[in-house]
Structures are given as structure tokens and as C-alpha cells.
Image: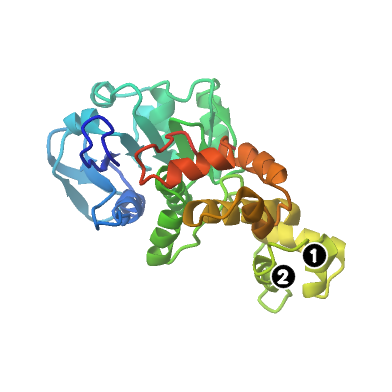
Amino acid sequence: MTSAAAGEFRPHRVAVLALDGILPFELGIPHRIFGRPRDARGRHLYEVVTCSVRPPGTVETDADFAVQIAHGPETLATADTVIVPASYELGPLYDEGRLTDELAAALARVRPGTRLASICTGAYVLAAAGYLDGRPATTHWADAERFQRMFPKVEVDADVLFIDDGDVLTSAGVAAGIDLCLHMVRRDFGTAVANEVARRTVVPPHRDGGQAQYIRRPVPDPQVATTTAARAWALGRLHEPIQLRDLAEQEAMSVRTFTRRFREEVGISPGQWLTQQRVERARHLLESTDLSMDQVARDSGFNTAQSMRQHLQAALGVTPTAYRRAFRTGGAERQDRVGTRH
């Protein structure tokens, strides 16, 4: 992003805090997602730096290898975003809900206003530091009850993939960390940039934060009919009125059966899913075209500009006009809090 005062380019600096017992997969997520986006001139939009709570050196992982970290805790003072991935060796943090002196000293370096994010049990770090007090947050569903007992001031929601509460974001386990990082890219630089990162990473471009973490029932047998064809059919007709019975007919199911199967597979209702897809379509058109608000609304299936305005305001917290302005100016007038709060 650019410095408005100096007019010089400076990438958004992401510091990834690697603690002993770090999960290698989750440690790599921020580098994979934030290391991809570039601007029209080929410059990296983010700078990703891994640091430890100690001087540069070895950090143990939960695997049969360690990682060499080149940066110490002073890096946290230079970050625009700090991400704490999961660790299986949190010690007193996990057992008693308190920071070690070493970790507390490291976090004290974080500048006020820095965006904070956690992946899976990294939420323990943010909670113990007080960053989640009075806020909604999530973590891996298997840890949610324990997490809530240990940190009663946190509003724990175990049924979502991630939660965006503005300057503090939390996610569930493993793959939900990918969803969270893609969401931050989308929030920072728009849908087109995030979709390109997702395409190169070969992951779905968008799983809404409010989607369920896991399916309590067994995965349906491959021979059992699914709702995949109906969703593909709908995505090609978002500009048209789509009724629930239309979707059910694509799978030759009753409305009741289709609705139940859809929720089992996607985690939300068909109506909620349609609205999400239309919001994504509107965002893409606002970013990439000069179509009028009325035309964007029609092409997205909202029918009227007023309806689109209401849905985008609810989902993103900004009007369509403000959203277009934020993402059609190369990031110079980017609104930091554009994003979905669940």
C-alpha cells in the first residue's frame, strides 16, 4: 500500500510469531497467502516476516524437525499485522491462561493500532494478553469449551470458520487459517486480488466466516445425490430471480430434502448462500467495472440499487459507493475496516 503523505510505495508488513511447538502447516499459511499478491507494477503488496519471542535461532515444531527463525521480537514493533499461528506447546498459557514473561515482553512491542490475528489455538495468546476481552472470537471447535472456561470475558463462537472484529481477527483450525488470510487480502485489496491468490493456491476463493466449522454428520456417500449441480446452475444465473424450488428441481429433490442436504454440505441455508454469492458478484463488478449502481444491482441479482446497498452495508459495513472508491484507487484511499464482521 502507499504512504499518502510521502507518496512512496510501502508493502503492508505482516509479522508471523513462531512459538515453540508451532504447527508447520499453519506457520506456512501466511507466507503462502500474503506472499502472492502484487500490484499492477509487479511489486509485492505484503512483506511477510517470521519472528520469535527470543533472539534469532531455532524454534521447535510439533513435527520431527525444527525451523530456523531469522528475526527476534523487535520485529513485532515494525508490523502492520501480527499473526499468531497454533502451537502445541503453550505451557502456562494453555494450562493457566497466563503469558510467560518472555511472551509478554514480546507482545509489549506491538504498536497500538496494529491488526492482530490468530489461527486455531493462537487465540490463547491473544486472549491471555487481553486483546479478546469483550470481543467475539473463535478457535478450533475441540478447544472451544475449554477456551471459554479459561477466558470468560471472551465471547466464544465455536460454529464459525473465522471472526473479523475489525482490528482483531481469529480463526478456527488448519484450513480456516487459509480462509482468514484470504479474507484479510480481500479486505485490504479487494476481491479480484484475493481470487487470484486463491486460484494460484488452488483453494476456494471464499468461504464465509459464518460457515460452520465442521459437519457433525458423516460425509455423504459419493453415490448419494448432492447439491453441487444446483449451486453451479445458480452461479450462472445470479442475475435472475432464483427460488428455492428452482434449486431443488435441479437435483430432482423435494424442497425439504434439498434444504436439509444443502445445509449439511454447505453449512448455511440456500438463501444465505445465494445472498453471499450475490454480494461477491457485486463486489467484483464494483471493483472491475464502471457500471452504474443500478446495473451492478441488476447483474448481481439484487434487482434494485437500494436492495444492493442494504445487503452490502450489512455484509461489509460500507455502501457500494464507498466500496468502489476504496478499491478503485490502487489502495491509496483503502478503508482498513472494510470486511465482514460475523
Quarter that holds the N terminus? top left
Circle number at residue 258: 1
Q: Is residue 18 visible?
A: no
Amino acid tagged 2: Ala
Residue 185 as seen in the image, left or right of residue 63 = right
x and y percentages locating residue 249 in the rendered image: 82, 72
Secondary structure category for the residue under label 1? helix
What colour scheme has been applied to the protein in the rendered image?
rainbow
Secondary structure category for the residue under label 2? helix
Q: Are marks 2 and 1 in contact (CB under 8 Å)?
A: yes
Which label's residue is closer to the chain start, 2 or 1? 2
Amino acid tagged 1: Phe
| Front residue (pair 209, 224) | 209
x and y percentages locating residue 75 in the rendered image: 19, 33
Please tell me which residue is depicted at 62% across the width and 37% down the height of the picture: 313
Q: In which quarter of the image is residue 217?
A: bottom right
x and y percentages locating residue 126 in the rendered image: 40, 29
Quarter that holds the C terminus? top right
Dot 2, crowdedness within 10 Å: few (<14), some or many (≥20)?
A: some
Q: In which quarter of the image is residue 196?
A: bottom left
- Marks 2 and 1, how far apart at CA: 10 Å
Please tell me which residue is depicted at 17% across the width and 29% down the height of the picture: 74
Q: Name the residue under label 2.
A: 230
